[in-house]
Image (spheres, coloured by chain):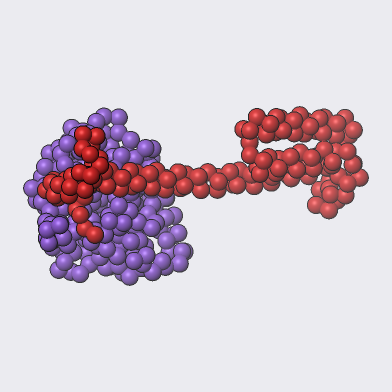
Amino acid sequence: MTTQGSVIVALLALVLLGFILNMLRKRRLSEEVSLIWIFAFAAVIVLMALPTLTSKVTHLVGAIYPASVLTLLALAFVGVMLVYTSVKLSKLTAEVRALAQRQVLAEARREAEATKAPLTTSEAPAATEKAAEKSAESAGKTPVADDGRE
Amino acid sequence: MSAATPETDAGSLLVLLPARNEAERIPVILERIFAVVPHARIVVVEDTSTDDTAAVARRCGALVLSLPINIGYGGALQTGFKYAWENGFDTVVTLDADGQHDPDDIPALLAALAETKADLVIGSRFVKDTGYRAGAVRRATMKFFSVLTSFLAGQKITDTTSGFQAIGRMPLGLFADIYPYDYPNAEVLVDLARNGGKIAEVPVKVRARLGGTSMFDLWSSMYYVVKMNLSILMVLMRKRRHGAS
């Protein structure tokens, strides 16, 4: 790989690294995820700074041009990151769905309890027990109310 | 508390309707359900409607669970299953809120559940000629999944896509635990059969839906076929779950 090429790739990686760090600073990226990107760009910079290491890796892979090895590595990395993102997204979707269900069920439970024992402002606290009994009775007649099973 | 509330009498029944923007059609259906199964608790799971479906259903006397975000048809159904499971209901009947399913068929489903000792009864359009007509693509798709599901479940099932079902306590536990969120059909039945569930069918009439679009146009039905095959394959590749109950 030519020195010019290496410098350009290294500079590009440096810019992207700065971009990632800036996102991290603004809290738009979690530290957990950003670490993966930081290591990836750092690795690119190291490879560009050490041409002997790059040619060793090229030889190891069996490629002729260091550039094609870098492309291969970059593609593999992007692919892995995409799958990782999809997995995270699926998990998040499932979690949000479960949360929505739990929220709606909790609300129903709270409402059922509220109709069982309404605390009206006009009544004194001592009268609430009686009121609760009364409302439980009347609630049993309406189809909306809780069925009162224990 | 009086000894016998109407609900405890009949072995508690919950009628579950996922609904989205059905404010106009839902009152008629709810009224019918109350007339047919007066002892049942009616739960409407309202999935992010833009009209006043929730208010209308509540006024009709249904318990309304209003989802804060759209979690799909299956997700809405599962919300109802979780409610029924947690509150100890023995039986859940699901039907669509768009008027496709006739509440008058509910007793037939319940009777089949009791008589055949099945865990799940499907209100089928195909057990006998019920006047249901569909386009060629849709018919072929349904036939394919009917044959595949019957084979994999080891029980004859003619209608895998029916949303009109009576569900007993055993499948309720399974569904409350894990249920597909988009369009739960064949894979649910295969999964249930693999977990030892018995499935029965009764014929029901299905009215042509009033407006709205069916999920089966050509592209989406191609997606559906591929996705459903994948779902079934996944069910077969997973371990049996041996009843959450």
Where residue B11 sits in the image (x, y, percent)? 17, 62
Residue for point 16% across, 53% down: B40
Where residue B95 sits in the image (x, y, percent)? 21, 48
The red chain is A
A64 or B5: nearer the viewer: B5
| Quarter of the view holding residue B179 | bottom left
Where residue B212 sits in the image (x, y, percent)? 25, 34
The purple chain is B
Residue for point 61% across, 43% down: A82
Which part of the image, by quadrant, shows the N terminus of chain B?
Answer: bottom left
> In the visual, does B31 lie left or right of B159?
left
Residue B244 appears in the picture as rendered: yes
Q: Residue furthest left?
A: B35
- Vertically, is B162 above or below B235? above
| Quarter of the view holding residue B50 | top left
- Vertically, is B68 above or below B111? above
Residue for point 67% across, 40% down: A31
Residue A75 appears in the picture as rendered: no
- Vertically, is B179 above or below A75? below
Residue for point 33% across, 47% down: A105
